[in-house]
Amino acid sequence: MRPVDGRRHGGGGVSYGVAPVAPFPFRQFIVKTHGRCNLACRYCYLYEGPDSTWRDRPRAASPAVLDRTATRIAEHASTHGLTALALVLHGGEPLLAGAGTLARFTASVRDSVPPGTVVHPVVQTNATLLTERRLAVLAAAGVRVGISLDGGLPGHNAQRVDHAGRPSWPAAARGARLLADRFPGSYAGILTVVDPTQDPVETYESLLGLRPPALDLLLPHGNWSAPPPHLGEERHGRWLCAVFDRWWDAGRRETRIRLFEACIALLLGMPAATESLGLAPFESVVVETDGSIEQVDSLKSCYEGAAETGLDVFRHGFDDVLRHPAVAARQTGEDALAAGCRACPLLRVCGGGQYAHRYRAGHGFANPSVYCADLQRFIRHVARRLTEDTARVPAASSAEGGTP
């Protein structure tokens, strides 16, 4: 089930049998500035999962890789007339490359793209290496900072340890609070993977204590052949419902939660862009430390080489990636989904769920999400809350003498 290798031996061109029906340009460029991490999280799908291709790559991206990547991003932006793009500085732990390197690369991309193209850079970090000096360098370069944590308490992060087995929480908490206190304008938010063994409301409120402007709640990576831990009885869906109710009933927006806002927008018939919900076109691409161009990292939770395309920034542009069979297949919308998904009344909201979560060995990705039951519970719960609260508005207005 490996993706087709798109390289034409003996040359830099690319040959594919089938062109995509309607290629959508990439708008998010995830660049691996460093391929190693200073932590050894026990559940990490990237370093502990089935894909070990990271072992054969350079520890850090060279100046040549970064320069060529900036050029390729600019080419793509020019070809497709992009007015804005997201630049995600990633790893491993990207701060191992140095804040100065991240700032210089960001400046290189901004200098390379056409006039009128706005670059929105963010670095995704575990926060343990954040210092005032590094944050000042990133802030001066206009790079926002996203933090990955399992929760806002030491016990929530028990599996996030360094290579000597020491807890990462003290350093991560210091970094997160420093960011919130001294550089709030650079604070992009917190990314947290759902853990149904932790109390959902306690987890949410503990994260609020770190004052994030936004939260990303992600389901743990898993699939039909390698199910995620604690799957069953809709535990992940129930967890999300509990957090949604706490967030929804607060009476004010304490923070943005992208999954919740996307679900509401999709239920109301509005467009929303998230990898977990909806039918928005696939628009992210990854550049590894050696210049290889790959699909998103979540695919590495499926099998060895699942994210590979066989392309690289030195010989190929990002339009070549759009013509890769695996990428083209993901841009066909509903046609790439299982028959049961296409017939489901929740299709426009669910969108089949996260792509990697659909995988089954021997059957590929044309399956429902392994979280199908959880997503149904969550979406129906949000729809019910919207319906109930909408019904109360005219009733309240009428009781107060207003127009029903």
Image (cartoon, rainbow, N blue to C red):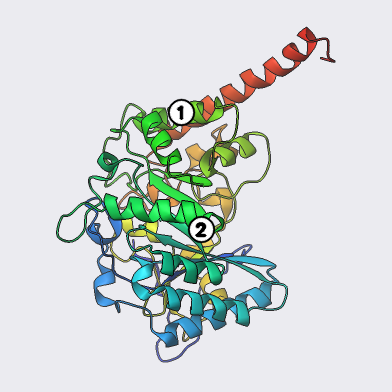
Image: 295 above or below 172: below
Q: What residue is drawn where x is 53% and y is 66%?
A: 139
Give the left or right position of residue 252, taking residue 275 as reference: right
**Front position in the image: 126 or 363:** 126
What is the CA distance from the residue labelled 2 to the residue labelled 1?
Answer: 32 Å
CB atoms at circles 2 and 1 under 8 Å apart? Answer: no
Give the left or right position of residue 375, taking residue 221 as reference: right
Label 2: which secondary element:
loop
* Residue at which label 1 appears: 241
Q: What residue is drawn where x is 37% and y is 56%?
A: 175
Residue 146 shows in the view: yes
Q: Quadrant of residue 172?
A: bottom left
Quarter of the image with the C terminus is top right
* Residue at which label 2 appears: 183
Task: Please provide percent x and percent y for residue 30.
Answer: 47, 67
Q: Circle 1: is it few (<14), some (14-19), or many (20+) Cα within 10 Å? A: many
Image: 141 above or below 231: below
**Marker disc for residue 328:** none
**Which kind of residue does numbered mark 1 sit on?**
Cys
Task: Please provide percent x and percent y for residue 384.
Answer: 57, 22
Q: What residue is drawn where x is 48% and y is 68%?
A: 136
Q: Quadrant of residue 230?
A: top left
**Which kind of residue does numbered mark 2 sit on?**
Phe
Q: Which callout, 2 or 1, points at the residue further toward the start of the chain? A: 2
Label 1: which secondary element:
helix
Task: Please provide percent x and percent y for residue 157.
Answer: 28, 45
